[in-house]
């Protein structure tokens, strides 16, 4: 059984590294290799989801490397591999043959493999390894077109922002070890809730910060805007079923820890609700399609985070899976239109769905699902998790409904633009057929994934992810209420069209600028850090360097004085000793004449002196 799990994570990781090492020589074969690996990984993930294998290998003393597939991680592994396969199918048909395909597909496989490690990790050290590789490969994918300075700068911003939040995982790991329970439990994710205070709070805070940063929740949301500089398949993979949902998955998995802390669940739930509302407003204000989809990703993941805080694990999991299908489809359609029409600005995309009917229809299915309209998947999944919010607090439920209404508004506004009467597009490119049918598959998934939100399948999902039998279930009026509000909001947004909202210019610019979060981060973190760096550099130049130079100069002067004064004195002393020794030697040689009578005289004189001394001493 362990071989199955090792193969699941090693296959995409190994193939990705191999494509990267071979480089441009593998460009022709890279799409086929990547598709074969992704299909094999999907088969392994499905098998693992049924068999629940575990694997363990020596790592550190008392801290083995452990991977495991349970109900929740099994569902996520299948979701990750399925979405990866569909996106790679799209990329193989749409990604230009003149591009560095081996590098692109290698990085995509490496990223997917690191996400699988993150999903199946049973201990914090393994989670950290997958987490780190995922962050590094996301930087390389966002900055794939590295010759463009704006893209590399965007990749740097995304990487540094998530990297800053990732420090929370190191805090959590250190606190778990310090608590004394870390070694006995091998830093098991399931054992973190057993830590004692104050370490329990440190562990909770570290995990929450890392999860919110990776999932682009407030106040870290702005990095997702920068990440849209990457290729559209990258956006579809990173921001639908992998990187940005990794934080939400971690919170869903460590629900007992949030509950045991006494404060983590409330903080997480309200942060998710606030993100769903505020980033929903940001999405409404965007005129760039990919930026609108990025803001909507933050908002939709906010519902998953809300579910984790409210203890609605089933609803959060259903939301995650349904969001993966809908959002990957929306990003891929936006990428197809960008390639065909050369723009992603909504005013310039008027009639885009009419020019490419199949793509437009698939995009519509995903957008209506995102809007929360029945009978599509996100409508039902959202109500399952909002039932948990209602049980926790009516105000939390109301906040979730407000976020759902905004979902309908920004989705309907996007549809209004792409379905307006078409304008002449003589230079429009044809979308390859191979890039269209993966979108159709995802559209069918948006419809089919509504089934798990209703009994008896939902009850089976409860059993699979091993949640308590007390999981809240939505009443019929909740489904009707959310659907009615979504329909009213979508109709209002469609009727309002492209007209500007009657808001102050400063308010509209604030939402269009992602709440000024990036500027705030520069003011609060970047500017002080740069000031400290400049102050440290000035201290180094003006104090430390001068101190070192002064010390060196003093040492040289001391050396010269030593050479001029001390060494001369020492040389004189040594010379005098040598001269005295020579003189004594000269005097000592004088009695050595070689004549016997002189030696007898010297002996008589010596014995006479000794006799006198002995007489005087007595």
Image (cartoon, helix red, strand yellow):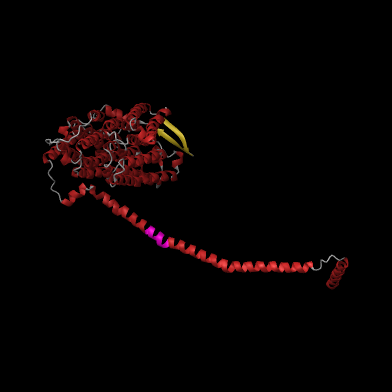
In the depicted structure, whether residue 485 falls above or below residue 454: below
Residues 59 and 598: in front is: 598
Please provide percent x and percent y for residue 58.
Answer: 47, 35
Please provide percent x and percent y for residue 289.
Answer: 20, 40
Q: In which quarter of the image is the C terminus?
A: bottom right
**Quarter where residue 435 is shown:** top left
Residues 330 and 36: in front is: 36
Per the picture, the main secondary structure of the magenta-coloured stretch is: helix
Is 482 on the left-hand or right-hand side of 77?
Answer: left
Residues 415 and 194: in front is: 415
Is 300 in the magenta? no
Give the magenta part as a residue range.
535-544
* Rendered residue at 26%/34% (across/down): 328
Residue 10 appears in the figure: yes
Please provide percent x and percent y for residue 347.
Answer: 15, 41
Residues 612 and 115: in front is: 612
Residue 394 appears in the figure: no
Please provide percent x and percent y for residue 579.
Answer: 70, 68
Is 319 on the left-hand or right-hand side of 579?
Answer: left
Q: Which residue lies furthest to the bottom in this view?
A: 616
């Amino acid at each position: 059984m362990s071989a199955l799990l090792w193969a699941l994570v090693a296959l995409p990781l190994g193939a990705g590294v191999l494509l990267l090492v071979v480089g441009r020589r593998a460009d022709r074969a890279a799409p086929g290799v990547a598709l074969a690996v992704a299909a094999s990984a999907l088969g392994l993930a499905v098998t693992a989801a049924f068999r629940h294998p575990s694997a363990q290998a020596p790592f550190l003393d008392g801290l083995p490397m452990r991977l495991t597939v349970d109900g929740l991680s099994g569902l996520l592994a299948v979701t990750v591999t399925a979405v990866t396969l569909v996106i790679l199918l799209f990329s193989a048909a749409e990604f230009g043959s003149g591009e560095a395909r081996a590098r692109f597909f290698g990085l995509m496989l490496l990223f997917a493999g690191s996400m699988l490690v993150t999903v199946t990790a049973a201990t914090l050290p393994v989670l950290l390894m997958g987490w780190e590789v995922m962050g590094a490969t996301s930087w390389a994918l966002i900055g794939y077109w590295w010759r463009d300075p704006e893209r590399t700068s965007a990749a740097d911003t995304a990487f540094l922002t998530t990297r800053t939040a990732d420090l929370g995982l190191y805090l959590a790991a250190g606190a778990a070890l310090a608590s004394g329970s870390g070694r006995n439990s091998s830093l098991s994710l399931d054992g973190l809730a057993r830590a004692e205070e104050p370490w329990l709070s440190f562990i909770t805070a570290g995990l929450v910060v890392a999860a919110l940063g990776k999932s682009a929740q407030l106040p870290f949301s702005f990095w997702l805007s920068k990440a849209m500089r990457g290729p559209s398949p990258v956006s579809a993979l990173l921001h639908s079923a992998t990187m940005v949902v990794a934080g939400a998955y971690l919170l869903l998995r460590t629900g007992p820890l949030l509950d045991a802390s006494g404060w983590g669940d409330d903080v997480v739930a309200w942060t998710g609700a606030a993100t769903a509302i505020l980033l929903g407003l940001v999405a409404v204000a965007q005129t760039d399609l990919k930026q609108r989809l990025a803001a909507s990703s933050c908002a939709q993941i906010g519902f998953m985070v809300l579910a984790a805080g409210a203890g609605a694990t089933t609803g959060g999991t259903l939301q995650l899976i349904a969001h993966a299908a809908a959002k990957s489809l929306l990003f891929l359609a936006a990428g197809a239109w960008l390639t065909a029409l050369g723009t992603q600005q909504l005013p310039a995309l008027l009639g885009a769905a009419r020019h490419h009917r199949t793509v437009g229809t698939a995009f519509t299915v995903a957008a209506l699902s995102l809007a929360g309209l029945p009978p599509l998947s996100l409508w039902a999944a959202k109500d399952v998790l909002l039932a948990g919010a209602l049980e926790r607090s009516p105000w939390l439920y109301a906040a979730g409904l407000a976020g759902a209404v905004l979902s309908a508004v920004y989705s309907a506004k996007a549809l209004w633009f792409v379905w307006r009467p078409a304008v002449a597009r003589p230079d429009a490119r044809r979308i390859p057929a191979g890039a269209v049918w993966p979108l159709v598959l995802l559209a069918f998934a948006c419809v089919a994934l509504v089934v798990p939100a209703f009994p008896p399948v939902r009850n089976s999902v409860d059993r699979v992810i091993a949640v308590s039998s007390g999981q809240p279930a939505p009443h019929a009026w909740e489904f009707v209420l959310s659907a009615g509000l979504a329909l009213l909001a979508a109709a209002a947004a469609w009727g309002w069209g492209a007209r500007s909202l009657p808001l102050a210019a400063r308010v509209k610019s604030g939402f269009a600028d992602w709440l000024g979060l990036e500027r705030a981060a520069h003011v609060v973190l970047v500017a002080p850090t740069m000031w400290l760096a400049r102050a440290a550099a000035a201290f180094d130049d003006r104090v430390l360097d001068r101190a070192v130079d002064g010390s060196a100069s003093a040492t040289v002067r001391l050396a010269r004085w030593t050479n001029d004064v001390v060494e001369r004195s020492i040389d004189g002393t040594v010379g005098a000793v040598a001269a005295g020794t020579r003189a004594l030697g000269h005097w000592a040689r004088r009695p050595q004449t070689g004549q016997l009578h002189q030696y007898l005289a010297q002996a008589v004189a010596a014995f006479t002196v000794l006799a006198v001394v002995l007489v005087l001493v007595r």
